[in-house]
Image (tube, rainbow, N blue to C red):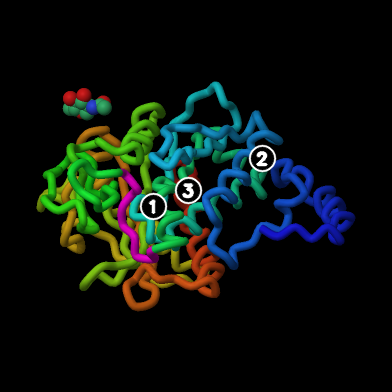
Amino acid sequence: MRFFSSLGVLSLLFVATLAGEGLNIPDKFHTVEFTHFWPVDEVNEYINEIAEANPDQVQVIPTRWTRELRPINAVKISSDMFANRPVVFIEAGLRPRDWAAHMVAIRVMHEFFSHYYNYLDVLEEIDIVIMPVSNPDGYEFSRNQDRGWTKNRQLNVGSDCVGVSVYHNFEPGFYVTPDPCEGHFSGPSAMSEQESRAVNHILGRFNVIAYFSLQAGGARANYGNNILYPFGHTYTVPDNEHDLFVFGDALSHAFTQAGGRRFSVGPAHNVWYDPHGNSLDHAAQVMNITFPFTIEMPYFGEHGYDIVEAEIEPLVESTLPGFIFIVNFFAGRIF
Ligand SMILES: *[C@@H]1O[C@H](CO)[C@@H](O)[C@H](O)[C@H]1NC(C)=O
């Protein structure tokens, strides 16, 4: 976000006009924009200050610390911090090169902060928990050193190669891949990593009814724009597949409302070629989450994940209606 001090007076007027609509938003965040990729520090500063200014509506939930000592934060948005309502959990960036995912999650969070009072009816029924950067070390490494980075920054015993693919570190289908130097190295054991534990912490601590893991589009022959439900690691589906499909299909329509491309809906094993130890199956199989989904963003650039700055705003604005649909659906307001 950029802070233009000359706009100070204007932004005060702006606050007055919006009173009753959004949360108390510190001045410097009135120019929040989605034309650059936010560093982790900027994300944390934003959520910490919003939470500090609005303690009854927003809470920062620290989960774990990464090896490079970054907090893995989630944000709880609620109308009653003590009610422990069913939770819709949105998480982004286990695979840290997926910058489209982070930016969509931040935009969604910003919507609930800046138009909080429009969602009061939703927030009477559910709490919303958002973890915008689930692999912060990996994200910073991807931003600063290696754009295509897929792992965290954990040290590996007996190897000079750094990092575990958190995306492959969950239980279902977990196996130890042999080479720590490879991008999909799964780690010494299932759930060995702070990042997988952080996601698991949220899944276990709250009554999570729906989990959305946001990823970039595509790898190999998969061109993104997918709404995927379990399972990835086996050719089976959960007992409630019908409900998963019906919801996913409705969500796909919601995503097209603002001019976005249609999303395909189906089980993850249809499109994933390297699905061992993924968080989607973990949510379903280990944590018994009824509505677990991975949303794969549209395909950008050469590899699917290489979105550029100019593409952020069209993406985040066109996907926002889908997330508004999600919270309304789980608040029981759309059937
Ligand atoms: C999930 O369901 C299984 C089977 O009913 C049960 O054994 C397990 O304890 C449940 N896990 C959690 C985290 O509730």
Q: State whether residue 162 is above or below residue 220.
A: above
Closer to the camera in the image, 255 or 294: 294
Residue 81 is drawn in which quadrant? top right
Going from N to C along the chain, the mark reached first, 2 or 3, is 2
* Magenta region, residue range: 146-154
The residue tagged 3 is 132
Counting from the top left corner in percent of width and height, residue 85 is at 48, 28
Disc number placed over residue 138 in the picture, else none: 1
Going from N to C along the chain, the mark reached first, 2 or 1, is 2
Ligand 1: give its quadrant.
top left
The residue tagged 2 is 49
Tell me which amino acid carries mark 1: Gly
Chief secondary structure of the magenta span?
loop
Judging from the image, what secondary structure is the residue with disc 1 in?
helix
Tell me which amino acid carries mark 3: Pro
Disc 2 from disc 3: Cα separation? 15 Å
Disc 2 from disc 1: Cα separation? 24 Å
Instruction: Name the mark nearer the viewer: 3 or 1.
Output: 1
Judging from the image, what secondary structure is the residue with disc 2 in?
helix
